[in-house]
Amino acid sequence: MRALTLLAALAALAAGPAAAEQDMLLGADMASPAMTRAEMSRADVEALIARGGPVDLSGKSLSGLDLSGLDLRGTNLRTARLNKALLRGTDLSGANLEQSWFLKADLSGAKLAGARMFGIMARDANFSGADLSRAVPIGDFRGANLSGANLAGLKGGADLKNQSMGLMRTVFVSVNLTGANLRGADLGRARLDYADLRGADLSDAVLLGADLSGANLTGATVSGAEFKNADVGGAQLVDLKGEDKARDWTARVNADRAITRASR
């Protein structure tokens, strides 16, 4: 039931209405032990790793646990709760993080290449310097820190052929993406409103129909990026690199409301 509630709430949030955004965490008792405490110790997790073979931590309560530096490649963490957990430098490459909870978790420098993140709740989490290349982050990262992160080839675009629960897409609202590598990332119809993309590399990224309203792209590289129907109302498009090579640059939405000159 918890997983279904999270997915339904995520679909409502991704659809866009402000009222839906306030319902994102409804249905979950954030003060419950399942959301705030760990039912296992680090030693317990290390013992599972030592046994060899795929580690299954699906549905486990691991909130607040220090799992920094562990090798959790390919681990099944589906629907697990890791709120405020420490995973600094942890290797989660190829892990199943679908419908998991990472509220205010610290994943700085973590390896998440190819990780599956459909329905993930990672508000205010720290992914600074992390590797999310080729990951599939269809979830809520509102307020997260992804500064300096590697998101090259990330698959965060909405799949319009599979929308039985509404428009499921990556939610990067108010996310810190300064200096992030987003080369070739698919962020079609993703929410990037008020995101900080200063100095980010968006070369060849797909921003088709993305919401960039209020975002700060000062100094970002946009060569080859697809901007068709991207909403740039109120966005800061100052000192862009490769603007002349951006695709469908003239097909942006609310381009007349974008900020193209630095204030003096």
Image (cartoon, helix red, strand yellow):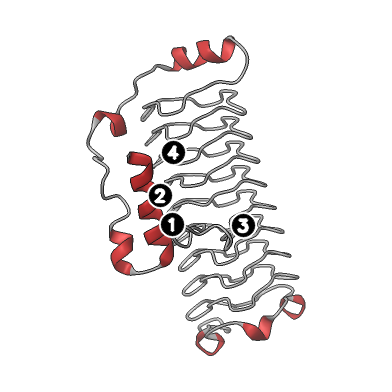
- The mark closer to the camera, 3 or 2, is 2
Can you give x and y, in whole percent of width and height, for residue 190 in the image? 53, 63
In the picture, the quarter occupied by the N terminus is top left
Q: Amino acid at mark 3?
A: Gly
Tell me the CA gap for discs 4 and 3: 27 Å
The residue indicated by pointer 4 is 100
The total of numbered circles placed on residues is 4
The residue indicated by pointer 1 is 165
The first of marks 1 and 3 along the sequence is 1
Q: Amino acid at mark 1?
A: Met
Can you give x and y, in whole percent of width and height, for residue 228 in the image? 64, 78
- Mark 4, residues whose alpha carbon is within 10 Å: few (<14), some, or many (≥20)? many
Q: Secondary structure at mark 2?
A: helix
As drawn, 263 above or below 115? below
Q: Amino acid at mark 4?
A: Ser
Tell me whether circle 2 and circle 4 mark residues in contact (CB < 8 Å). Answer: no
Front-lying residue, 54 or 140: 54
- The mark closer to the camera, 4 or 1, is 1
The residue indicated by pointer 3 is 179
Q: Secondary structure at mark 4?
A: loop
Tell me the CA gap for discs 3 and 2: 30 Å
- The mark closer to the camera, 1 or 2, is 1
Front-lying residue, 64 or 121: 121
Tell me whether circle 1 and circle 3 mark residues in contact (CB < 8 Å). Answer: no
As drawn, 108 above or below 34? below
The first of marks 1 and 2 along the sequence is 2
